Image: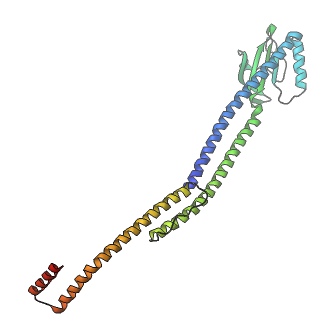
């Protein structure tokens, strides 16, 4: 199957545009992930530091009261909080029990734990407070999933728009090129039939096709001059041969009418040749 060059050119630009969009989105996505992770980690560490300072000032009861008051405010997207004693008995928080998979973990880590009846991927900070108390501050990693989904939907939409515009542009470009090529084909067909006076059409755009057409027109002019030169030489040769051929014809006609003997024909022709 033969594909029009204009369409293939447009398709190549579409593929190049989509590849560029993907590379741009990949770098943007990487920057987004790094920035979000840094901001999320920084917020967790700052919140943990604040809660630890409250514990240092007011003790476990003061920290438990603060956590309860904070959870009662029902802030959207509130962090995961739990304060336990040394035996992991909850004193305050929004999860019922201390996560079993954090028994030996300290500092910042990622875990999967049940939150509101669903297993949730959580980034959390565990702090061991004086007298063996334990504090866990975490955040659901899927909290920003709607923003991430919007990013991917926007990227997919941009890719579709780019593909549609590229395909439409390919058809428009193909139509424009075909109109130029049809004019060239008409001229070439006329030249092949012997009309050397035709020339390829040119436009005022000065594009590559105009440059090619002008180059071919110069070539056709030179070919036409050479053909005229050969024709003139042929006419001159035909004119020079016309007189001897006419004389030869006259002699043959004379011999056909008189029918002389071979000896007489030889002598007459010899005499004429010597006279010539």
**What's the image's color scheme?**
rainbow
Q: Which residue is at a point 89% across and 13% down the rendered structure image? A: 61
**On screen, residue 235 above or below 134:** below
Badge count = 0
Q: In this rendered view, identify the residue nearer to me: 78 or 264.
A: 264
Q: Position of residue 60 (x, y in %)?
A: 86, 12
Q: What residue is shown at x 41% (from left), y 69% (from top)?
A: 228
**Visible in this render: residue 124?**
yes
> Left or right: where does residue 155 sit relative to residue 271?
right
The image quadrant that residue 121 belongs to is top right
- Dividing the picture into quarters, in which one does residue 44 lie? top right
Residue at image position (20%, 85%) is: 251
In percent of width and height, residue 125 lies at 76, 19
Q: Residue at x 78, y 19 (%)?
A: 45
Name the quadrant of the C terminus: bottom left
Residue 80, compared with residue 154, is above or below; it is above
Q: Report the side of 116 relative to 250 (left or right).
A: right
In this rendered view, identify the residue nearer to me: 57 or 169: 169
Which residue lies most toward the front here?
A: 275
Where in the figure is residue 77, as x and y percent of width and height?
A: 82, 29
């Amino acid at each position: 199957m033969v594909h029009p060059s204009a369409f293939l050119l447009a398709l190549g630009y579409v593929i190049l545009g989509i590849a560029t969009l993907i590379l741009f989105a990949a770098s943007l996505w990487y920057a987004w992930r790094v920035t979000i992770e840094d901001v999320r980690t920084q917020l967790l560490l700052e919140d943990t530091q604040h809660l630890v300072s409250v514990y240092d000032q007011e003790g476990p009861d003061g920290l438990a009261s603060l956590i309860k008051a904070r959870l009662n405010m029902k802030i959207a997207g509130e962090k995961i909080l739990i304060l336990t004693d040394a035996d992991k008995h909850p004193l305050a928080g929004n999860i019922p029990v201390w996560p079993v998979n954090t028994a030996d973990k300290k500092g910042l880590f990622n875990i999967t734990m049940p939150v509101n009846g669903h297993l949730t991927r959580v980034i959390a900070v565990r702090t061991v407070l004086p007298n063996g108390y334990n504090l866990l501050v975490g955040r659901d990693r899927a909290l920003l999933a709607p923003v991430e989904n919007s990013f991917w939907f926007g990227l997919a939409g941009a890719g579709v728009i780019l593909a549609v515009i590229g395909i439409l542009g390919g058809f428009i470009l193909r139509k424009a090129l075909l109109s130029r090529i049809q004019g060239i084909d008409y001229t070439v067909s006329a030249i092949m039939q012997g009309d050397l006076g035709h020339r390829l059409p040119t436009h005022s755009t000065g594009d590559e096709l105009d440059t090619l057409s002008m180059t071919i027109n110069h070539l056709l002019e030179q070919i036409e001059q050479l053909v005229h030169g050969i024709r003139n030489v042929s006419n001159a040769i035909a004119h020079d041969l016309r007189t001897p051929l006419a004389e030869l014809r006259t002699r043959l006609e004379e011999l056909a009418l008189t029918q002389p003997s071979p000896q007489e024909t030889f002598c007459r022709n010899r005499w004429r040749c010597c006279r010539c």
